Amino acid sequence: MLSEKRRSTLLHHVRTNGSVSVDDLADILGVSVSTVRRDLDEMDERGLLRRVHGGAMAISGGEATEVSLVERAIRNLDEKGRIAARAAELVKPGSVVLLTGGSTCAQMVPHLGRVRDLTVVTNSVAVAHAIGTSGDEVEVLVLGGLMRNTELSLLGHLTTQALADIHIDTAFFSAYGLDPDYGMLGAHLAEAETDRNMIRVARDLVVLADHTKFGQRSAVRIAPVSRINTVITDTSAPDAAVAGLRAHDVNVIIT
């Protein structure tokens, strides 16, 4: 089992049961006790659980509760549509852009056909399918990896390997959460490292975040504020959050 998937499964069992022993986790995951201990120690340091003698306990404020891609896609449709359309205006002819699997990024697809000589790199099966069936002449490069069924996204070491020889001009991320001081937040520990690796090969990072993404809580940080070039949000975004981002020299576009 890949380390990202193993730790995600481990955290799920701890949060579901409240507390789990090292021996039980080793049996569930099919790994050694020493591997479980190392995982628990690391996750305790990151604030995702509490390490106790012989096992671990769940704590509040750990990995955020996720909503599936399908459920998220029907929320705040008007705001997401405006944000996506504005984001597409930033895509330049001849560029290589990355679209992740979030619901707002997916709404960029109908606007990309106007961009000449465009290459889209994605770890999202849904985004790749939408572009492939759009009839637009957009070249798509799909990153391999382990698929998360709820997100239709690919992650893990195979995804990281595929990124080795790729340079991205602009990476567009649909944020789970956005904090003006802490940065872009993720909901799922297993996806975090893949997201960070995708950002590493990108020159610019554009975060798409409707107003509901401000105030979301998560212990999983994808990128610090200093790494974010642009945030696109809607008119209901909190004034204090917008001012905070701009104080960190982030270009904030309100649409």
Image: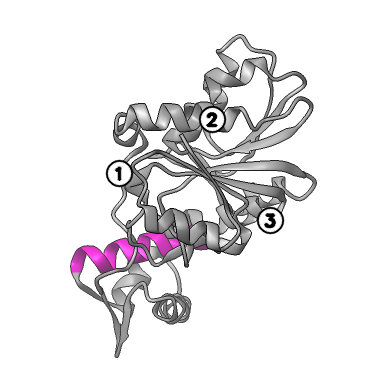
- Determine whether, in the image, residue 55 is placed left or right of residue 201: left
Q: Residue at x 35, y 27 (%)?
A: 78
Disc 1 vs disc 2: which is toward the camera?
2
Q: Are marks 2 and 3 in contact (CB under 8 Å)?
A: no
- Residue pointed to by mark 3: 200
The mark nearer the N terminus, 1 or 3, is 1
Q: Residue 215 location, x and y as percent?
A: 32, 57
- Residue pointed to by mark 2: 86
Is residue 184 something that shows in the picture?
Answer: no
The mark nearer the N terminus, 1 or 2, is 1
The front one of 6 and 30 is 6
Res. 170 mark: none
Callout 1 crowding tier (Cα within 10 Å): few <14, some 14–19, many ≥20:
few
- Determine whether, in the image, residue 54 is placed left or right of residue 157: left
Q: Residue at x 28, y 64 (%)?
A: 13
Q: Residue at x 33, y 61 (%)?
A: 217
Q: What is the chief secondary structure element of the magenta stretch?
A: helix
